[in-house]
Image (tube, helix red, strand yellow):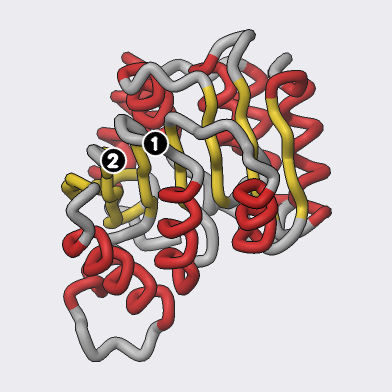
Amino acid sequence: MYASAEAWREVDAYFVDTLVPEDGALVSARRSGARTTMPQAEVAPNQGKLLALLCQIAGADRVLEFGTLAGYSTVWLARAVGAKGHVTSLELEEGNAAVARENLERAGVADRVDVIVGPAAESARRLVEDGTQPYGFVFIDADKPSNPEYLRAALALTRPGGVIVIDNVVRDGAVTDASSPDGRVQGVRTVLADISRDERLEATAIQTVGSKGWDGFTIIRRTG
């Protein structure tokens, strides 16, 4: 987790208290991140709400998520698709998936979520091979060096009109360093270059500051 200035945390707290109150299930899911392999890596509450709103604005009733951890963002997305919708979340570690399933049960959305355990690229490949029904919204928030591969999988599993969101694209400003030896930075830079060259995609990136430090999202719409 990146360093977060006190003022950023205070503003986030104000926005959350005013606009995005968490219920007990969300609070439990967020706190249970401490039991996963990446504590405090989940999105902030206001970011979770943003994902849910983008999903609803896109009219998506099927969501694909790369990276489950404790299932905090998964709960937000499962609630966004509604009782007749579906979320498929891909998680590498069984221990994390077990925590997430507890949280999904507590939130009352377990019946609309499948958590698939294993390397996300392999899981996504199986979804493609199985002819899975296209997803309307994809959230990519797993290991950053694999971002280009995850984008290719997302494109194989969506259709025109689909929305794809990639998290952690600013990396405390390191994204501008073309010579960075950090594979996570290079994974972000490569996927951004791939997006810019793909005529089927239109995209923008936004920087965020707050309780999660200085980072940001890339928001993509598939047009073809």
Residue ID at (78%, 22%): 105
Q: Residue at position x 47%, y 66% from top?
A: 149
Q: Is residue 219 above or below residue 146?
A: above
Which of the labelled discs sits on residue 222, or is there none? 2
Whole-percent x, y for residue 217 in the image = 29, 48
Residue 86 in sight from this viewpoint: yes
Crowdedness near tag 1: few (<14), some (14–19) or many (≥20) residues, C-alpha within 10 Å: some
Q: Position of residue 195 (x, y in %)?
A: 25, 59
Quarter of the figure with residue 113: top right
Q: Amino acid at mark 2?
A: Arg
Per the image, label 2 sits on a secondary structure element best described as strand
Of labels 1 and 2, earlier in sequence is 1
Q: Residues within 10 Å of mark 2 (few under 14, many from 20)?
A: some
**How many marks on residues?**
2
Residue 206 visible at all: no
The residue pinned by badge 1 equals: 159
Question: Compared to 166, does 62 lie above or below?
Answer: above
Point out the image quarter for the C terminus: top left
Disc 1 to disc 2, C-alpha distance: 7 Å
Whether label 1 touches label 2, CB < 8 Å: yes
- Tell me the quadrant of the picture where the N terminus can be found: bottom left
Q: Amino acid at mark 1?
A: Arg
Circle 1: element type:
loop
User: What residue lies at 73% left-to-right and 14% top-to-bottom?
Assistant: 108
Q: In the displayed structure, would residue 102 be above or below residue 170?
A: above
Q: Residue furthest top?
A: 83
Q: Quadrant of residue 15?
A: top left
What numbered label is drawn on residue 182?
none
Give residue 130's position: percent from left, percent from top.
Answer: 69, 45
Q: Residue at x 49, y 69 (%)?
A: 146
Left or right? Give the position of 176 relative to 167: left
